[in-house]
Amino acid sequence: MTNKESILLSTNGLVKSFGGVKAVNDISLSVADNTIHAIIGPNGAGKTTLISLLSGDLTPDKGTISFAQKDITKESVEQRAKQGLARSFQITSIILPMTLLENVMLSARGRERHAYQFWKPASQNKDIEEQAITVLQQVGLWDQRYKPASDISHGEQRQLELAMALAMQPRLLLLDEPMAGMGHAESEKITGLLGTISQDKAILLIEHDMDAVFQLADTISVLVSGSVIASDEPANIRSDPQVQSAYLGGNSC
Amino acid sequence: MTGSQTNPPQEPDRDTQGKSWGKVSGSTTVYLGIIVLLGFAPPFLSLINEPFYLDLLSRMLILGIAALSLNLILGYGGMISMGHAAYLGIGAYCVGIPAYYEIYNGFVHLALAIVLSGIFAFLSGIISLRTKGVYFIMITLAFTQMLYFTFVSLEEYGGDDGLVIELRSEFPGLFDTENNTNLYYCIYLTLLGSLLLVHRLIQAPFGRVIIGSKHNEERMRSLGYNTYRYRLVCYVISGILCGIAGVFLGNFTSFISPEMMDWTHSGELIFMIVIGGVNSLFGPLIGSMLFIFFEEWLSGITVYWHFIFGLMLIALVLFGKGGINGLITALFGERR
Ligand SMILES: Nc1ncnc2c1ncn2[C@@H]1O[C@H](COP(=O)(O)OP(=O)(O)OP(=O)(O)O)[C@@H](O)[C@H]1O
Ligand SMILES: [Mg+2]
């Protein structure tokens, strides 16, 4: 299961403060190819802040990030995305007036060198359309593809949110609570999908759904008040007394 | 790839493909009808012997092109520029100053207008596009004011008073623009070309990025799009198109002055877009036609026409969602 030969992403001593609050405090972690590294922790632990630092939406006060053996700490969001780093947002971030298909096609095209194409309609790119359709099928939104993103339910918007990250065909997926807001059936479907995808992709997964986390993760790190208090295989995390008292608290699983 | 194809739902109605710009809908038919009628205006007006109206129409179409170019950044791109009259001025001066040196070749005028509008848009865009919202509005206004005062200070070209253009742009061997009908058709064809250009641009991948960035810039960046650069390119295209409108404005009025770049004219272009309907291809043209019509009509009735006009605008903004385009769409079909 654990296939840790090649580290794709690693961070070294990341720090990010907001005013006096150290949201991320000296985090060093790594994600290997073809594995899922889950981050769990209570509300306000700094999980989203960590993802934003990795994606480039925030710049760290201290520390470095390396991706595919390259220091990307100073690179912009779009430069990182082009190199194969995709994030999904905890607060759904889609383009509401566009159809689902258009949303996902925009994602699929983002990976291309550029989109300075001024004449031929975007909708006529069959290659991009096929990629988008495939992803929409995977997340279960294919039959809604011509609806504007504003016209689907909240749960479906969550599926679209994930689809947009998937369609980028990244090397590393940074998923911020992808299942939050989805129904039970969809959650299970997406859990299965992430399992399949992780066979040839690295995933950093933040998720409150403990069933999904323990089912999927190769490594789990527990984040409390900006610091990693434990990082290990799922079985060891489950039995770690420090983790139990700090986070799992007995009411999960 | 997964099994969701087992139960393929019906192919949805094509017209519900989001707000897919460009499907021929009822409202589009109305607009195309208006465009065709505009093509027959000169023979009709000479038949009823009302040449004055050709002047009015020429002005409507010139400012229609300008408003269309502004809508590209304002409507589709969400960049509210309060300085677009600068490009009308640049275009007009690209006719006037060469004409002052007896260079009347229209291709020279057009080439100058394209290059200089492009450069001005590029330089002002580099700075202004780093800002958002009110700051963007103020910076675009500031750049245009700078240009305005630069031309005021150019005594050689009439300074504040401007300059009379003795002869219109010449297109040797093609047509004679001294003839008002020819000039009208020249403007008309440019308008058609501009409409086609904007239509294609917004459907193309480039336009999708511009529209996406208006609605959710953060997401577009995380998809790998350098939104700033796409916007800059869009801003330059818009400026160039408006500069071309300026070439026609210079020819049409046969007179140039810094007043053409006055901030009130930038504001009027925004009004035209709001009247016609932000986010619609034909809205800015319809808006400019109505704007000039009311300006002409009301100013003939009372000197307080600005006041009445202002009230009408307020009413339109408050009650007429989507401008005239919203109305036409509601009456003739889909798209929205
Ligand atoms: N932009 C910001 N400005 C100020 N404080 C912030 C900002 N973003 C996050 N914080 C603070 O940083 C801390 C970590 O927030 P973060 O959103 O990373 O937590 P989280 O683990 O994702 O929580 P949740 O499970 O609720 O999503 C919190 O105390 C939060 O209030
Ligand atoms: Mg969070």
Image (cartoon, grey):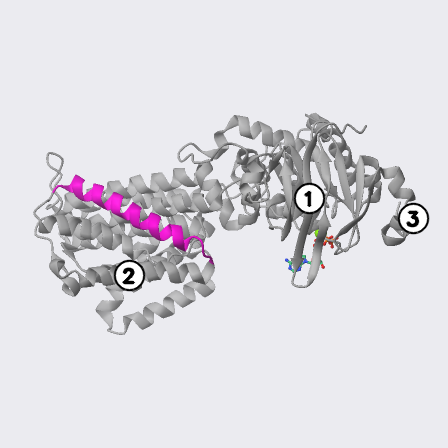
Q: Residues within 10 Å of mark 2 (few under 14, many from 20)?
A: few
Chain containing the residue with disc 2: B
Assign a secondary structure to mark 1: strand
Say yes or no: labels 3 and 2 on the same chain: no
Which numbered marker is on residue A12? 1
Cα distance between the residues tagged 3 and 1: 26 Å
- The residue labelled by disc 2 is B146
- Chain bearing tag 1 is A
What is the magenta segment's predominant secondary structure? helix
Discs 3 and 1 carry the same chain letter: yes
Asked whether residue B336 is in view, the answer is no
When the figure is inspected, residue A190 is found, relative to residue B266, above or below; the finding is: above
The N terminus of chain B lies in quadrant: top right
- In the image, what residue occupies the spot 33% across and 71% down? B308
Q: Is residue A219 magenta?
A: no
Name the amino acid type tagged 3.
Answer: Pro
How far apart are the two marked residues, 3 and 2, measured between alpha carbons?
Answer: 69 Å
Q: Is residue B110 magenta?
A: yes
Q: For this rendering, which residue is in front, A196 or B131?
A: B131
Residue drawn 24% across the image and 52% down it: B90
Q: Secondary structure at mark 2?
A: helix
Circle count: 3
Vertical placement of A105 versus A151: above or below? Answer: above
- Amino acid on which the number 2 mark rests in the picture: Met
Which percent across, then down, holds residue B159? 15, 63
Q: Amino acid at mark 1?
A: Asn
Do labels 2 and 1 touch, CB within 8 Å? no
Residue A218 placement: quadrant: top right
Identify residue for label 3.
Answer: A241
